[in-house]
Image: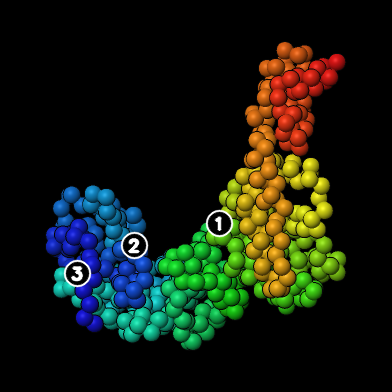
């Protein structure tokens, strides 16, 4: 294929200094041909990094001696270099090869790669594309295809998720034989570490933000479902398929409602959207209804996303669990304003995310009824407009004043909290005169 790629001058210089030719390979070439956005530049060649013989101005650090992977830095730029190699994997589809042999044969290197669209090389020396496996035709047709599907997935189970992620990020279709082999080898995901599975899931959840492919993240969830992969990621989600909901309020079953909620929510809250109704199938089988599913969902979050599952950080787990547990808050719109004000003030920094989830949850019901403004939005704005104290430090007096008034140190925190609650409900009370009058009552 006649196509000249825009290669950074520093990389052209690196190639001119090296003892052997250097090739750009993978996503950078794929994206250039497909007209997608920029991505990292990976480079490869027929020699190990130590044998390139390049200038010391290019700092070269081998980061994986077994695979020969090295990071080459020049000023503010860096490139990941790998020598051409042949890999062998142990049975079971683990992510790391057991045997690695370096080679000078470009086609042998291409054969160990995952998909043909990622097996296209750019020869920097001759400014031309090298396409040993027919990857250009697949890129032009927007198809994800493996040259040898059974071997691709049997070698590395993570490629099943990687296939989905690349397909939805790029908007490519998946070749039928490749999809069939992926489904047949899906069980090999069990051999992949939770951290690697988690990372691919995270990237699928925000796939639409990579190159701007609309609803890419929603398509990713549907593909996970179709290939039967939830059991290797978040098993409880699989239980939601086919679980009907009250047709008066919901158009979809539980799992499709979850998919739709993820579709509508903002990227930062997609993990919470994915988990917000995960407790419904359990509640339905245990109690015959879905009441209290939000609390069950929170419990499932802490278990399935925690150390026994995908091992998210404690901060992420706490945030997602809180959003799940509270996404039904004031659903009937009968919570008293005083209670609403305290809830919003206590959770002020999380309210926008909660509202985002609630609104997406409502849209995902698939009903055409008129959407009403979430009351939390109005209450939050009221607190801002009325200059309500959002923390104890916003009160017009502090613990020192309480000590002067004779309040025992052990009681100061409780007194301040009571005063704060009163001022959140009625912000005009947040003045030193009124606060001191209340403190003196406590001191009596």
**Where does the image place residue 91, in percent across and percent down from the top left?**
49, 73
In the picture of the structure, the residue carrying the numbered disc 1 is 268
Task: Choose the circle earlier in sequence order: 3 or 1.
Answer: 3
- SS for dot 3: loop
In the picture of the structure, the residue carrying the numbered disc 3 is 124
Residue at the (64%, 66%) spot, across then down: 261
142 vs 366, left or right, is left
**Where does the image place residue 342, in percent across and percent down from the top left?**
74, 41
Instruction: Look at the image and tell me whether residue 82 can be seen.
Output: no
Residue at the (60%, 60%) spot, across then down: 271
- SS for dot 1: helix
271 vs 196, left or right, is right
In the picture of the structure, the residue carrying the numbered disc 2 is 40
| Scheme of colours in the image | rainbow
Query: Marks 2/1: CA distance?
Result: 23 Å
Q: Residues within 10 Å of mark 3 (few under 14, many from 20)?
A: some
Identify which residue, 5 or 396, lies in the foreground: 396
């Amino acid at each position: 294929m006649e196509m000249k790629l825009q290669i950074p001058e520093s990389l052209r210089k690196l190639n001119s200094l090296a003892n052997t030719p250097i090739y750009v390979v993978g996503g950078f070439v794929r994206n250039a041909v497909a007209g997608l956005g920029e991505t990292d530049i990976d480079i490869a060649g027929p020699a190990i990094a130590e044998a390139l013989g390049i200038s010391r101005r290019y700092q070269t650090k081998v980061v994986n001696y077994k695979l020969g992977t090295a990071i080459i830095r020049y000023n503010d730029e860096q490139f990941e270099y790998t020598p051409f190699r042949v890999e062998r994997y142990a049975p079971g589809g683990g992510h790391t090869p057991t045997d690695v042999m370096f080679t000078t044969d470009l086609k042998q290197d291409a054969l160990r790669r995952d998909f043909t669209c990622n097996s296209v090389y750019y020869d920097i020396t001759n400014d031309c594309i090298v396409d040993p496996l027919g990857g250009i035709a697949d890129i032009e047709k927007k198809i994800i295809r493996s040259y040898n599907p059974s071997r691709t997935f049997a070698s590395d189970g993570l490629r099943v998720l990687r296939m989905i992620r690349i397909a939805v990020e790029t908007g490519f279709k998946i070749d039928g034989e490749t999809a069939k082999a992926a489904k047949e080898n899906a069980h090999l995901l069990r051999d992949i570490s939770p951290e690697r599975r988690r990372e691919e899931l995270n990237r699928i959840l925000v796939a639409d933000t990579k190159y701007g492919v609309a609803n890419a993240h929603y398509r990713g969830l549907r593909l996970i479902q179709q290939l039967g992969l939830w059991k290797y990621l978040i098993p409880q989600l699989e239980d939601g398929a086919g679980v009907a909901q009250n047709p008066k309020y919901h158009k979809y079953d539980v799992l499709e409602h979850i998919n739709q909620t993820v579709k509508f929510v903002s990227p930062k809250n997609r993990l919470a959207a994915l988990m917000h109704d995960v407790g419904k199938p359990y509640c339905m089988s245990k109690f015959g209804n879905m009441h209290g599913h939000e609390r069950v969902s929170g419990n499932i979050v802490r278990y399935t996303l925690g150390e026994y599952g995908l091992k998210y950080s404690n901060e992420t787990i706490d945030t997602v669990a809180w959003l799940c547990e509270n996404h039904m808050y004031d659903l009937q719109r009968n919570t008293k304003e005083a209670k609403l004000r305290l809830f919003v003030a206590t959770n002020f920094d999380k309210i926008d995310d909660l509202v985002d989830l609630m609104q997406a949850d409502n849209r995902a019901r698939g009903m055409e009824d008129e959407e009403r403004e979430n009351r939390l939005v109005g209450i939050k704005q009221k607190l801002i407009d009325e200059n309500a104290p959002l923390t104890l430090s916003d009160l017009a007096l502090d613990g020192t004043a309480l000590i002067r008034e004779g309040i025992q140190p052990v009681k100061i925190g409780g007194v301040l909290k009571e005063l704060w609650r009163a001022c959140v409900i009625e912000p005009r009370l947040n003045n030193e005169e009124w606060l001191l009058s209340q403190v003196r009552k406590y001191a009596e």
